[in-house]
């Protein structure tokens, strides 16, 4: 299936707004043609450095600018992170994702420790992903040399709405980090969050931006805001399951070979809603009882969800069918 990188927002909106069953049917057809059936990647996410972030992202419990229950902690020890990775692998996860609440990493002991974490996770035969904030070209090169599989750096929302959510870094700052990651030969993991007070047009603009990157991201996480007390977004209404399905289906149609991840907010979706998201093209989930600082379905529930739908679990480094 040919990939496009010249989507106009009005084209994306036309796809997104079509009758729901037609949209899901179109997305499921694309998914089956490009991924050869329904299988799911199990990713585990660990906060390796929690809280104290100087950024002002309006949704984030880890910002030092917000009065939340999250307190700043030091970077975890390498051995403790690798023990958590082994536990995740034993539970069935194939990708281990590590998140640090930084504006961006500084060269030195902490960054060297992250490189050791990446090497250790890869040494277990797992895919390794990190999200460390903004990185420069040299840091991307060092992460690539350590064996990093993927780097997560979300755009969060549309360029038009971005200033209502974050003011301490620009949209172009985020795109620049994605460029460094891509040029280093690391897979790009980049998506957004629904429920930040954005319009449907904003959601479509975000998806168009992702699809119009020079190369589609290998992973696109679709998150639903988990509103946290003490953040500027604490009063936002929950995102509906229909909104999640529409975003996932549209992402699948625009980026046929991308792995679309059903991410934060999944705990509020019942099994049927999650299966509909998977029918519409989601083929990756965060697996484990915690996502950085928010809760997630436990592993037993997720295995029941996967087995109940007859889904196959993807192997490490398994990619879309040609």
Image (cartoon, helix red, strand yellow):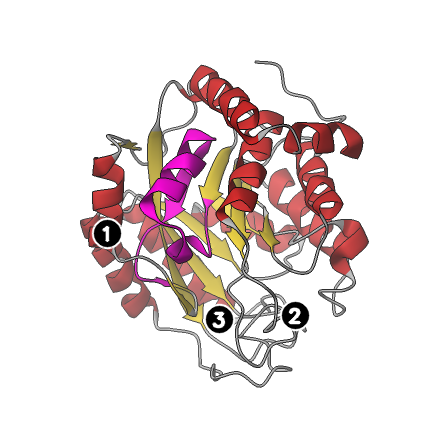
Q: CA distance from mark 2 to mark 3?
A: 26 Å
Left or right of 7? Residue 196 is left
Q: CA distance from mark 2 to mark 1?
A: 31 Å
Does residue 273 belong to the magenta stretch? yes
User: How crowded is the residue under tag 3: few (<14 C-alpha within 10 Å), some, or many (20+)?
Assistant: some
User: Magenta stretch?
Assistant: 262-290
Foreground disc of the pair 2, 1 = 1
- Residue 103 in the image: x percent, y percent? 63, 69
Can you identify the residue that label 3 sits on?
A: 110
Q: Secondary structure at mark 3?
A: helix
Sequence-wise first label, 3 or 1 = 3
The structure residue drawn at horizontal position 51% and vertical position 51%, both measured from the top left corner, is: 143
Q: Secondary structure at mark 1?
A: helix
Can you identify the residue that label 1 sits on?
A: 301
Left or right of 202? Residue 252 is left
In the depicted view, which residue is nearer to us: 135 or 305?
Answer: 305
Which corner quadrant holds the C terminus? top left
Can you identify the residue that label 2 sits on?
A: 58
- Residue 126 in the image: x percent, y percent? 31, 44
Sequence-wise first label, 2 or 3 = 2
Indicate whether 255 appears above or below 146: above
């Amino acid at each position: 299936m040919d990939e496009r990188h010249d989507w106009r927002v009005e084209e994306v909106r036309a796809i997104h707004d079509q009758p729901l069953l037609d949209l899901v049917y179109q997305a499921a057809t694309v998914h089956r043609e490009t991924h050869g059936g329904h299988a799911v990647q199990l990713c585990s996410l660990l906060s390796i450095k929690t809280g104290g972030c100087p950024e002002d992202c309006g949704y984030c419990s880890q910002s030092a600018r917000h009065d939340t229950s999250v307190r700043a902690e030091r970077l975890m020890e390498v051995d403790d992170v690798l023990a958590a990775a082994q536990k995740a692998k034993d539970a069935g996860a194939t990708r281990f994702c590590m998140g640090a609440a930084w504006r961006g990493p500084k060269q030195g002991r902490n960054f060297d420790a992250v490189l050791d974490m990446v090497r250790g996770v890869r040494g277990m035969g797992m895919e390794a992903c990190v999200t460390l904030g903004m990185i420069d070209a040299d840091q991307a090169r060092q992460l690539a040399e350590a064996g990093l599989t993927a780097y997560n750096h979300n755009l969060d929302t549309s360029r038009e709405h971005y200033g209502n959510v974050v003011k301490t870094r620009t949209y172009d700052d985020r795109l620049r980090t994605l460029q460094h990651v891509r040029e280093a030969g690391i897979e790009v993991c980049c998506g957004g969050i629904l429920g930040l007070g954005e319009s449907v047009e904003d959601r479509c603009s975000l998806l168009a931006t992702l699809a119009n990157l020079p190369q589609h991201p290998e992973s696109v996480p679709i998150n639903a805001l988990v509103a946290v007390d003490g953040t500027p977004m604490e009063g936002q209404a929950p995102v509906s399951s229909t909104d999640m399905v529409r975003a996932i289906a549209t992402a699948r149609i625009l980026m046929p070979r991308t792995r679309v991840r059903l991410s934060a907010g999944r705990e509020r979706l019942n099994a049927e809603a999650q299966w509909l998201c998977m029918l519409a093209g989601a083929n990756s989930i965060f697996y484990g009882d915690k996502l950085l600082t928010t809760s997630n379905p436990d592993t037993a529930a997720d295995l029941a969800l996967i087995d109940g739908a007859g889904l196959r679990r993807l192997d490490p480094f398994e990619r879309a069918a040609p």
